[in-house]
Image (cartoon, rainbow, N blue to C red):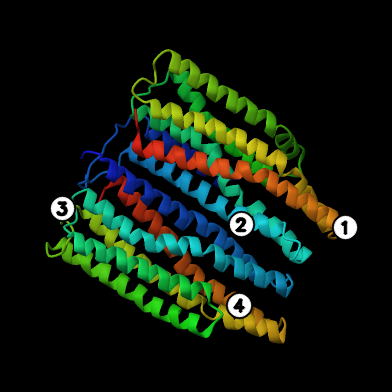
Amino acid sequence: MEMTETFIFWKYLHILMFVGWVGADMSVFLSAKKSIDASLPFDTRITLLHMALRIELIPRTMWKAALPLGVMLSREMGLLQITDMQLAGVWVFSIAWWAVSMTGAIWYDKEWGRKFAHFGNLLIFGVGVGLIAVAIASAYGHGPFDASATWLLWKVGLYGLINLTCLAIVLAYDPMGPAFGRLAVEGTSPEVEGLITRTFNIAILPIWSTYFLVISVAFIATTKFI
Amino acid sequence: MHKRIIAIALLGLSIWFGVAQALTLSVESDGHITGYEVVLFLHQLLFVFWLGPDLGRYIWSTRAANSALSPTTRITAGGLINKIELFPRVCISLMLTVGGILTEAVGLTHPWWQMAGIVLLGPVWLSMVLIGHFRANTDLGKLIKNTDVLFRLFMTAAILASVSYSWSIGRFDTTQWVAGKLVLFAAIVLFGMFMRIRLKPFDAGLAEMASDGPSDKIDASMSKSLASARPYVFGIWIALALAAWLGVAQPG
């Protein structure tokens, strides 16, 4: 295929998105991991957790940006049949999805912020299941993506799955806030520390699954071997 | 130790595998993985794990310099910076080797001795980074740390000399973007050196805070040090982003 200027532009943004997602998430992971260190004073641990959540806004943004950027790139490659109106719809949805997600993440300590976060979780579930369904339908020739570009169908389906693993991280990590609340009120105890450590350890599985899947998707895009 | 040797051997094998492969650009599944694609993927991963963690490292450095936070929090932030910055350091050490092999795919062939040097550079530089990080208190670790400025000056001069010579004999006539990427890499190595020099009072401040507690003098020194290093931090990010653009667009 010919590399047009617009294709190059979207491809470049797609790679930068990868940088801001998995690359920046390393700092989030290490900060969150350090926050469960029981030998540190409470103010240090809460700062670590708070900073992890603040830095996480970068990967959170990139994860949402992957949807419209992927659509633009697929369209440029001639592998996605989509009208201009539908394309505008994808952008509007993505921006709204990002705004809901960011509102929930920034104001995680407010009641209304938690409502946004809950709504955001429903959207994540919808996007995840929806994209897996689109990938399967396209594979059978009934979807918007070119059925012969099987590598792209894998990317779309796996991105849907990544949304579900990200949702699993959010849900697995959910008890961390109340656990730190107890730490603030009750102070450290084997029970509270056990809860914090257990919560982190449960979240590890979907976290590493997400890293593995995102890197696998990038590998598929580069090699197109499937 | 054995695991490290196996990891380096696997890395070496995978990048050698890419040497003889051709550039492909296809929208259809091709059913196989070429060595070129593997090396290109490694190249992208190095970019991802270089720039991405560096953003977090920078954010944490502002916390470590923040006098409103407790000394323990700031010292913990310093420890975290040390851990996070291992990612960019590992990536910079391997980038020239992986990038050098990739240039074969775009028609920039190298004589065997040059290719041997390119392939060996990665593991050697990586070893220096790992020893400097995990064995910082040993004699060898201190030697590596103390010669970092010299090593970076040597690398910068070597890259610029190589690019100048290759340019003068027309090797870059059809791949000028590769020359641009190499010059940007040399600039990054140099910026990294200046950044580290500027951050010496910052590191010393953290060490002093850990032993003697906080003081206004330490706070002022750390803030000033961080501010003076900031242009180089941003310079590295801009140069990396430009190099990535050249790699994607391949103008010239």
Q: Give me the residue at 12% from left, 62% from top.
A: A141
User: Which of these two is toward me, A126 or B135?
Assistant: A126
| Residue lying at the far left of the rendered structure | A141
Give the x, y percent position of residue A31.
Answer: 61, 63
Q: Give me the residue at 16% from left, 55% from top.
A: A146
How dense is the environment of label 3, judged by Cα within 10 Å: few (below 14), some, or many (20 and up)? some
Q: Tell me if B63 is positioned left or right of A204 in this view.
A: right
Callout 3: helix, strand or loop? loop
Q: Which mark is residue A196?
A: 4
**Which amino acid lies under the numbered mark 1 shown in the image of this protein?**
Asp
The answer to whether any part of residue B5 appears in the image is no
Q: Give me the residue at 40% from left, 62% from top.
A: A63
Locate residue A97: give its quadrant: bottom left
User: Which of these two is toward me, B31 or A99?
Assistant: A99
Callout 4: helix, strand or loop? helix
**Which amino acid lies under the numbered mark 2 shown in the image of this protein?**
Ile
**Residue holding disc 1:** B212
Q: Which mark is residue B59?
A: 2
Q: Tell me if A36 is positioned left or right of B218 in this view.
A: left
Task: Kindly report the distance in space between the C-alpha atoms of the residues bearing marks 3 and 4.
Answer: 47 Å
How dense is the environment of label 2, judged by Cα within 10 Å: few (below 14), some, or many (20 and up)? some
Placement of the C terminus of chain B among the 4 image quadrants: top left
Q: Give me the residue at 70% from left, 69% from top.
A: A44
Asked whether the residues under the numbered discs 3 and 4 touch, taking CB atoms below 8 Å apart as contact, a structural biologist would say no
User: Which of these two is toward me, A213 or A19?
Assistant: A19
Give the x, y percent position of residue B139.
Answer: 77, 38
Task: Kindly report the distance in space between the C-alpha atoms of the residues bearing marks 3 and 1.
Answer: 67 Å
